[in-house]
């Protein structure tokens, strides 16, 4: 989850690096630092807390130079403290390192280095990297920062993203990527080059980027970038032109990125659907999936792997694919899947859903699937991300940059991507009549408008939040395709307001959890006018009978439910398969407004990060 920014070129590195780190704030951190080389010296500034603290320190005691590296840290080894903040400097002061990942064997390496007389300044695992580089530079690799770095990283176990700088070579940086500890993007400028762990940090300077793959390293100067494997094999650089609009990454008139991104969903869904559906014929075009009819017909199962909100999206997509394509779908957590020795083969498609494309639990599960010859697909938002690059085919969410740690528009667009996939598979496998295909496509075409109408209820939701924000326990209940929405609604509340909330299949309440319900327990019931409506009305009555405070998510025009629930949030009538996309909107807004009333740090909740690149 750490953020890395590097620069070498003709400008002052300091503002470029600090502003770049500011664009990575959403990744979560507890300390930050910057180092530049000037006049043969390394100049270092570090501080704990928000980036504003580092910015103030640099303003009070300025540093500048034409080469530098910076870092925002999310502590794994070593408490959040200035001495543990990156960059870390080698004992003789020549080498400087920033790092994302975990050196799994750092204790044995540290022990050996101490035995050689190295004096450590921090409690971090990262410091062993810079001390190793110094050891190899002294043992003949001096003069080549790349060679000293190559030798040092060969001793590391774990996943890493590393950037190295040297006082003796103030014109070059070395970057390394091993495993899935977050990306390394190399930005190509004119007489200057950039390094970042994520695109937003350097997008204002360049749209031309190279993404390091695992076990690759690069030597970066102001005029050139040379990529090779860590074994020394030259690599042909693959330059991507990034289309993101950096302006869209600004909050605009919204108080938080989360509210902005909630309200962007009608547009982002339009972008997700746009250009992919022939509404006349009910056909879908997913060019990047690389799926033939023969391959589609040969499949015997799909396994969806994801984490957090993306996992809940997969639970919704299961309904689409099983209904339209008549294919069995298993959905599993990335962090669990890798330990299951799954029964999959070449007739299995493993679908990874990941907004960041860098979630290590999901990436590791993908590698497990690859080892068993499964076809790898991914649904991703982050262009050029690792998940996208290792897949046989992918479907982009087209949600635009999602900055808030709490995922909203990526969730709804990933659900729609699975709807598109299901319709495509159904057409290729012949499990849909042309009439059915046209109807599914028609229903999808209405969705952005239905979401836009659901967003119009914000004022009522804000009023309701004022009645609920002081409660400390919530239950979210749903059935069928909206059970995953109960899970997602609970997660949104948990992760941004720090209130305990539990999503539950409504039918399970009578098997125990109903004992929890009393007059201190708000119970959110997703009770849309669908085949399960009567069951949900019964559920509402059971909760009311125990004094629960019931908030119903209901279909516009349903006046009966108002006689049953304490509060009703209405959404427009929606085709049942697509109702989860609309039902989640009030739950997103309710979580947001409760969090704001509780004074929570909505866009950067405590302990969380946007991209979880550690296990
Ligand atoms: C969702 O609000 C959370 N930020 C978290 O659960 C997230 O969905 C999860 O970490 C997966 O992230 P990914 O989609 O980038 O893989």
Image (cartoon, rainbow, N blue to C red):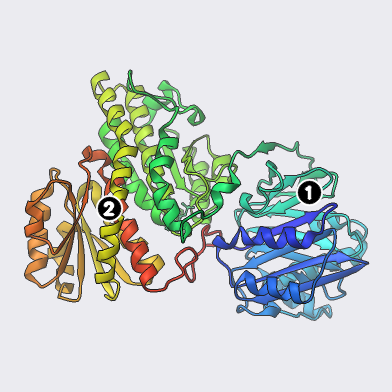
Decide if ligand 1 comes within 8 Å of the CB at mark 1: no
Residue 479 can be seen, yes or no = yes
Q: Is residue 453 above or below residue 298?
A: below
Q: Which mark is residue 457?
A: 2
The residue under the point 61% across, 63% down is: 2
- In the image, taking residue 48 as reference, residue 347 lies left or right, namely left
In front: label 1 or label 2: 2
SS type, badge 1: strand
Residue reaching furthest front? 253
Measure the C-alpha gap from mark 1 to mark 2: 47 Å
Name the quadrant where ligand 1 sits: bottom left
Q: Is residue 597 above or below residue 420?
A: below
SS type, badge 2: helix
- Seen from the viewer's position, the closer of residues 506 and 522 is 522
Q: Residue 233's x, y, as percent? A: 79, 42
Residue 342 can be seen, yes or no = no
Mark 1 sits on what residue? 193
Label count reads 2
Q: Residues within 10 Å of mark 2 (few under 14, many from 20)?
A: some
**Circle nearer the N terminus (1, 2):** 1
Q: Is residue 82 above or below residue 495?
A: below
Q: Residue 211's x, y, as percent? A: 67, 45
- In the image, taking residue 284 as reference, residue 203 lies left or right, namely right
The residue under the point 82% across, 61% down is: 165
Q: Which mark is residue 337?
A: none
């Amino acid at each position: 989850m750490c953020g890395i920014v590097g620069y070498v070129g003709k400008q002052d590195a300091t503002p470029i690096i600090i502003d770049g780190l500011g664009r990575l704030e959403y990744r979560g951190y507890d300390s930050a630092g910057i180092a530049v080389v000037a006049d043969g010296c390394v100049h270092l500034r570090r501080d704990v807390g928000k980036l504003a603290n580092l910015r103030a320190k640099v303003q009070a005691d300025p540093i500048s130079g034409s080469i530098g590296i910076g870092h925002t840290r999310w502590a794994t080894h070593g408490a959040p403290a200035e001495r543990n903040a990156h960059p870390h400097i080698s004992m003789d002061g020549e080498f400087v390192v920033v790092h994302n990942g975990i050196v799994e064997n750092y204790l044995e390496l540290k022990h050996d280095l101490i035995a050689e007389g190295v004096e450590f300044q921090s409690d971090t695992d990262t410091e062993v990297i810079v001390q190793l580089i110094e050891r190899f530079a002294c043992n003949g690799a001096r003069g080549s920062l790349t060679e000293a770095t190559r030798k040092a990283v060969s001793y590391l176990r774990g996943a890493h993203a590393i950037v190295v700088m040297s006082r003796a070579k103030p014109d070059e940086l070395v970057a390394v990527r091993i495993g899935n500890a977050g990306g390394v993007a190399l930005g190509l400028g004119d007489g200057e080059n950039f390094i970042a762990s994520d695109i937003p940090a350097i997008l204002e300077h360049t749209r031309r980027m190279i993404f390091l793959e695992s076990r690759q390293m690069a030597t970066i100067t102001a005029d050139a970038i040379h990529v090779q494997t860590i074994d020394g094999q030259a690599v042909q650089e693959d330059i991507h032109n990034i289309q993101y609009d950096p302006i869209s990454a600004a909050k605009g008139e919204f108080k938080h990125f989360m509210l902005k991104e909630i309200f962007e969903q009608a547009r982002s869904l339009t972008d997700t659907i746009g250009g992919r559906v022939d509404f006349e014929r009910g056909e879908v075009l997913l060019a990047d999936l690389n799926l033939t009819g023969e391959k589609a017909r040969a499949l015997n199962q799909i396994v969806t792997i994801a984490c957090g909100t993306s996992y809940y999206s997969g639970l919704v997509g299961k309904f689409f694919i099983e209904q339209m394509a008549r294919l069995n779908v298993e959905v599993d957590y990335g962090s669990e899947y890798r330990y299951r020795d799954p029964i999959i083969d070449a007739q299995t498609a493993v679908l990874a859903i990941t907004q960041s494309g860098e979630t290590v639990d999901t990436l590791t599960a993908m590698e497990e699937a690859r080892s068993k010859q499964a076809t790898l697909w991914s649904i991703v938002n982050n262009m050029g991300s690792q998940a996208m690059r290792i897949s046989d085919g992918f479907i982009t969410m087209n949600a635009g940059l999602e900055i808030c740690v709490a995922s909203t528009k990526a969730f709804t667009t990933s659900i729609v991507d699975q709807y598109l996939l299901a319709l495509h598979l159904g057409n290729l496998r012949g499990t849909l009549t042309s009439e059915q295909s046209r109807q599914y496509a028609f229903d999808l075409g209405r969705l952005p408008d239905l979401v836009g109408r659901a967003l119009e209820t914000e004022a009522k939701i804000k009023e309701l939040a004022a009645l609920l924000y002081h409660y400390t326990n919530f239950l979210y209940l749903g059935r069928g395709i909206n059970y995953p929405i109960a899970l997602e609604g609970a997660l949104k509340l948990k992760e941004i307001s720090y209130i305990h909330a539990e999503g539950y299949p409504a039918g399970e309440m009578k098997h125990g959890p109903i004992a929890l319900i009393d007059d201190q327990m708000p119970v959110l019931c997703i009770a849309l006018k669908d085949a399960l409506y009567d069951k949900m009305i019964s559920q509402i009555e059971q909760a009311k009978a125990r004094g629960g405070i019931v908030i119903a998510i209901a279909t516009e025009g349903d006046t009966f439910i108002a006689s049953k629930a304490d509060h009703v949030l209405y959404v427009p009538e929606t085709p049942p398969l697509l109702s989860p996309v609309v039902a989640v909107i009030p739950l997103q807004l309710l979580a947001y407004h409760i969090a704001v009333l509780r004074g929570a740090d909505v866009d950067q909740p405590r302990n969380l990060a946007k991209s979880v690149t550690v296990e």
